[in-house]
Amino acid sequence: MQGRKIQINDAKIYEKYKGIDCDYVKRFYFVHPPPTPAEMDMKIAYVIVAYKGAGLIEQLLRAIYMPQNVYCFHLDKKSSDEFRRVVHSFIDCLPNVFVTKKLINVVWGHVSVLQAELNCMEDLIHSDVPWKYLITLVAQDYPLYNNKGIVEGLKKLNGLNNIESYPMPENFAYRADNIWELKQTGNGSEHDGYRMDCTWKKKPPPPHNITIMKGWNHIAATRKFVEFVLYDKIATDFYKWLSDIYIPDEVFFSSLQRHLGTPGGYHDNENPEWIMRAFGWVANGDNRQCYGKWIRENCWLSTRDLRWVLATKNQYKLFTQKIPFEFEENLVECLATIVEGRKYPT
């Protein structure tokens, strides 16, 4: 039996922080332990893309916040003014947290999903924080370890990126083989207000002999990889090529990760474990059980799902998703309590 569900109202979050001194915000809402030498040596940059759910964003940021790291938010340009105001009400008190000024209208399946991440990446490259790894998140993510555990997981990568990358399945090949166009449907202002239509016009081969690969766009990337993605001609040419395919964010990083010479990339015979998410997906043989709700083939979690999220098979995973916008009242509380006491496996 599922527990009572709640949705954190944006207005309540705003009232929580309205008029409060920033020193109080940092001391009581964004509490953190003193960073260890290992944490100071492995500073992390975060890209967080969101379009709603300020309450989830606040809880996510409180769970991952450390003063030595740096955090960039991309807030969807079509999001409400209230949503943006609420997010600013708490992040403006944190000197190492900011919203990119290069906000765009993000549409699922369109290159704008990827561009939003790249906009934050460029800001973070110019940050004064000398970070070593960059992690991409969305509002519905939550960590499975505290910062110390996340650092331990990143250290085990031994200077490689952690990017899911496998050959494009035949049943998905049409996504990258053809030119797609963005259309407005008139069905609201969020994702349902747009769709991607296939023109069935064939695309030329990718530039630089890049092999098309697939994988989730939830990544941990070295600083050199991010610089490569932003400024190397191989990457920028590839970005232009895939700007009119379907769901390019699941192709861009994954394909570059296998390309010869990519900083932190894999060789053909390497297939390390992807540690960025423990999540339920209908095509995932390990995590196909869902006690919450299936939405677009993804499991929106309930408290009962924490049994498999935290199971031994997922012990190396750093984050989980998807935390529903309307979630069981003890879901995040349980996660926060468990995470605080977990140690990353040696």
Image (cartoon, rainbow, N blue to C red):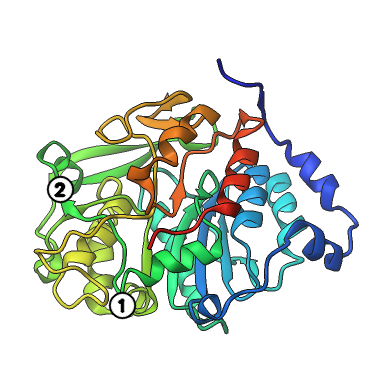
Cβ–Cβ under 8 Å for marks 2 and 1:
no
Residue 339 placement (x, y as % from top left): 56, 50
Front in this rendered view, residue 26 or 184 = 26
Residue type for callout 2: Met
Q: Which quadrant of the structure image shows residue 234?
A: bottom left
In this rendering, the answer to whether 272 lies above or below 39 is above
Find disc 1 in the rendering and name its residue.
Answer: 228
Total number of numbered labels?
A: 2
| Disc on res. 168 | 2
| Residue 37 visible somewhere in the drawing | yes
Q: Is residue 275 above or below residue 286?
A: below
Q: Residue at x 31, y 77 (%)?
A: 228
Residue 105 position (above or below residue 148): above
Amino acid type of the residue that numbered disc 1 sits on in the rendered structure: Phe
* Left or right of residue 269: residue 82: right
What is the secondary structure assignment of the residue under circle 2?
loop
Q: Residue at x 21, y 56 (%)?
A: 165
